[in-house]
Image: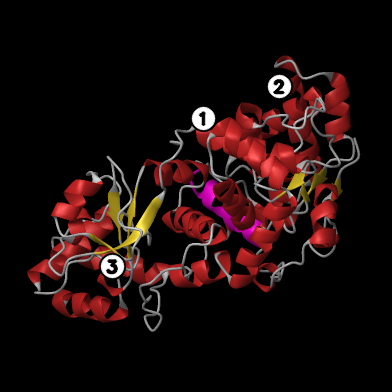
Amino acid sequence: MRIRFVSNSWRHLLLPVGALTLAACASQSVETAQSSDTAQGSADVAADMRMSAAPATQAVPAEAVRDAAGFDRWVADFRRRAAARGVSERTLDAAFEGSEFVPRIVELDRRQPEFSRAIWDYLDSAVSDARIRQGREQLGSYAAEAREAETRYGVPATIIGAIWGVESNYGSNFGNYETIDALATLGYDGRRTGFAEEQLYAALQIVENGDIDRERMRGSWAGAMGHTQFIPTSFLAYAVDEDGDGRRDIWGSIADVMGSTANYLKKNGWQPGQSWGREVVLPPDFDYAQAELDTRRSSAQWQAAGVRAVDSRGLPSLVSASIIAPAGAHGPAFMVGPNFRTILRYNNATSYALAVGLLSDRLDGAPGVYGDWPRTLASLSRTEIKDMQGLLNQLGYGTGTPDGIMGPNTRAGLRAFQKANGLTADGYPTHELLGRIRVAAG
């Protein structure tokens, strides 16, 4: 077995074979032309979100990570275990001959950005004019494939197109890492061994099934693959051969891409004919403790509580709707339903699901967001949020173990502090609010 430790400099120059078709017919928008030192674009942003949910185990020492013999032993051991699970020697030889450890993947996996991106900045990129224009062009070019997927699975073509746009900018940037190398690197590194090994085994099954060969199986550093970024286990569960050529090809067949994406959503609870949600206007006395995804009422009940439509389209007809206010009382609010929660199954981040919903609306000709985002408010850093959590705990407003992440417990603690101090209790962290908490804590 040849094992070559790959430097960071050249791998980002490779274009996935499956991207060649779309790269030739669609210009890459500015927002995804990022430096490889910060991100590969939407593909890695999505992968970051998925990997954050994967359990992490104890990392091996840094010197072990750079030990070629150690990687060789790890691959040999994994090969034995994969063979015991039924993977053929032919597939194992094809997968691991010339297998490469990629230090850059370890760097990307271990990074924890100090500053989070404000939701309005994320939406500016994910739902940009360029992406809307390109999405309409792509849905026009592949109208037959989009129609077929919508008819068969009950998922609107614009939702499929929106996921395609957010995940890979319509195929122009779905990652240049060889999936086998990426997952073997993560498995050997040891921080996410369980996740990486299960995904690597699934990747071998995909090769064994003949859906794609090892060289063309490319994607993000975290193992998400193809135009709409399926991890290998999701590929095995949901990918479909929509064009009937005997292979499930989410790298080169747009029919397979659209069918697989729609099938994923259908199998995860998509409700045909129902809106994902819509922007709404909240009453002045709205209780922001109700602005959580686990608080669910019908549209009629929300309307009776004073929630109203933002335009002539009215409120969406939903029997199990939640209100979300991503910027608290400072920004727009949205009523979202079961299909929004299904999009969260694809990628469990509210900003992501909101981007997909809003981009879908724009692709369908609907207007953008009416409300103004609080663009003058700077986001708190992870360290500042962790500091705020500790101070709230000290003051008796329990937020759990400080981790620098704004979750339901932190929002509840922050709302309790705001209410006790005569402030609008929206649970949205600002620097001004952090200052008040610091003063109160002495």
Left-right relation of 4 to 131 = right
Disc 3: which residue: 328
Magenta stretch? Answer: 41-53
Of residues 14 and 105, the one drawn nearer to the viewer in this rendering: 14
Horizontally, residue 224 falls left or right of residue 277, namely right
Q: For residue 47: magenta?
A: yes
C-alpha gap between disc 1 and disc 2:
31 Å
Which residue sits at x=75%, y=31%? 248
Tell me the SS state at disc 3. helix
The 10 Å Cα crowd at callout 2, few under 14, some 14 to 19, many 20 or more, is few
Q: Characterize the local packing of mark 1: few (<14), some (14-19) or many (20 or more) Cα atoms within 10 angstroms.
A: few
Q: Nearer the viewer, residue 123 or 185?
A: 123
Left or right relative to 75: residue 301: left
Q: Cβ–Cβ below 8 Å for labels 1 and 2?
A: no
The vertical placement of 433 against 151, above or below, is below
Q: Which mark is residue 267?
A: 1
Return the disc, 3 or 1, that comes first in the chain's sequence: 1
Residue 311 or residue 261, whichever sits in front: 311
